[in-house]
Amino acid sequence: MTSTQKEIADLDCIYLSFDEPQKEEFWIQIQNMVPWAKRVDGVKGSDAAHKAAAALSDTEFFILIDGDNLPDKDFFNLKLDIGEEHAGAAFRWKARNHINGLMYGNGGMSCWSKEYVNNMRTHEASDGTNETLVEFCFDPKYFSMHNCYSTTYPNYSPFQAWRAGFREGVKMCLDRGRLPTLVEFGEKVRGRNYDNLCIWQSAGADIENGDWAIYGARLGTYMVMLDGWDYKKVQWFDNLAELWEEIQHHDVSSKSPPLGEILRRRLTLPIADLTPDASRFFKHHYGKMHRNVDINTTEMSVIRKMEGW
């Protein structure tokens, strides 16, 4: 298979924003960092917004930056290997989550081919399969990458933080996009998603609005696994805005701990009510566990090496 190195700086860069409280502030910073950046703003629907980004790009592959994300400047000095096997593909690198210190694909830098975006049918445009209802990532041409090149800041308002936590609290309960039974939840929803789910529900008390993210993650898991809430509603931000109207006046300090106890008891989730100091301690040491390698390294290749496949 032949491989062609692409300078990241030679690819179009699209800033994709919607209603993020910091989107104008971040847009200024991104323009200073990436003067050739373009912008798509306010398009409803994840599928439609990505197609609008693809339409704006003049290069077949383009870099995408989410509206609550700040890239590492050095990313734009790198070269990406795009081989024949990557025709019509997409890549997503990890992001550091400012709330809880997690490093995974959520909110991270990504590189999409226009072919991939224009052919996909996901979220609000889903073809009806479980894999496409609330995610992009189950397509074989979607490459989850090992390295981390940005920081996501989903905490500039209580609503933004709650929504970020709620969506992950729902999506990380799923088994390849399908809602598991309670028995299946205990058997299948394990590994990295399970760990990330527990961290969303435990860490972040040291960050402004982090308590809302924790409460959102707990509430999302409770509602989808124990209260019959239709998980497909996370396709549309309007659904979450309506739900926010019902819970925005909740006292998080009194609502979140009992909800955590229910999840520990009924789903055996090993979550904790961390103090701000304990949360800082966790993030300090968790962050040291990750090491960047080559930009082209996939997450799966690292897992195979670690587990001796």
Image (cartoon, grey):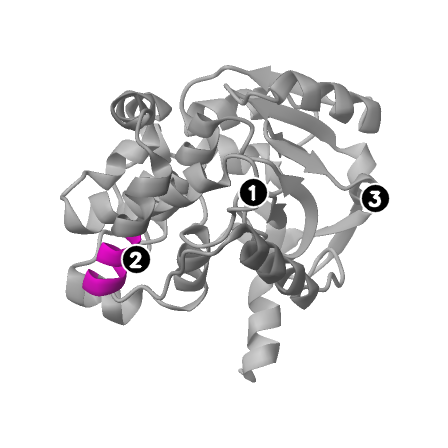
For this view, does 275 lie left or right of residue 131? right
Number of marks in the rendered image: 3
Instruction: Specify the amino acid type for callout 2.
Output: Asp
| Secondary structure state at the residue bearing disc 2 | loop
Mark 2, residue position: 175
Q: Is disc 1 in contact with disc 3, using a CB cutoff of under 8 Å?
A: no
Mark 1, residue position: 88
Percent from the top left, x then y, of residue 205?
Answer: 51, 46
Q: CA distance from mark 1 to mark 3?
A: 26 Å
Residue 113 placement: quadrant: top right
Residue 29 placement: quadrant: top right
Instruction: Specify the amino acid type for callout 1.
Output: Gly
- Write the residue at 81% across / 48% down: 79
Query: Is 262 one of the magenta-colored residues?
Result: yes
- Write the residue at 75% across / 26% down: 30
Instruction: Specify the amino acid type for callout 3.
Output: Asp
Segment colored magenta:
260-266
| Secondary structure state at the residue bearing disc 3 | helix
Percent from the top left, x then y, of residue 62?
Answer: 67, 33
Mark 3, residue position: 74
For this view, does 257 lie left or right of residue 85? left
- Write the residue at 73% across / 58% down: 2
In this rendering, does residue 61 appear at all? no
As displayed, is residue 127 above or below residue 238? below
- Mark nearer the N terminus (2 vs 1): 1
Question: Callout 3: few (<14), some (14-19), or many (20+) C-alpha neighbours within 10 Å?
Answer: few
Q: CA distance from mark 2 to mark 1?
A: 25 Å
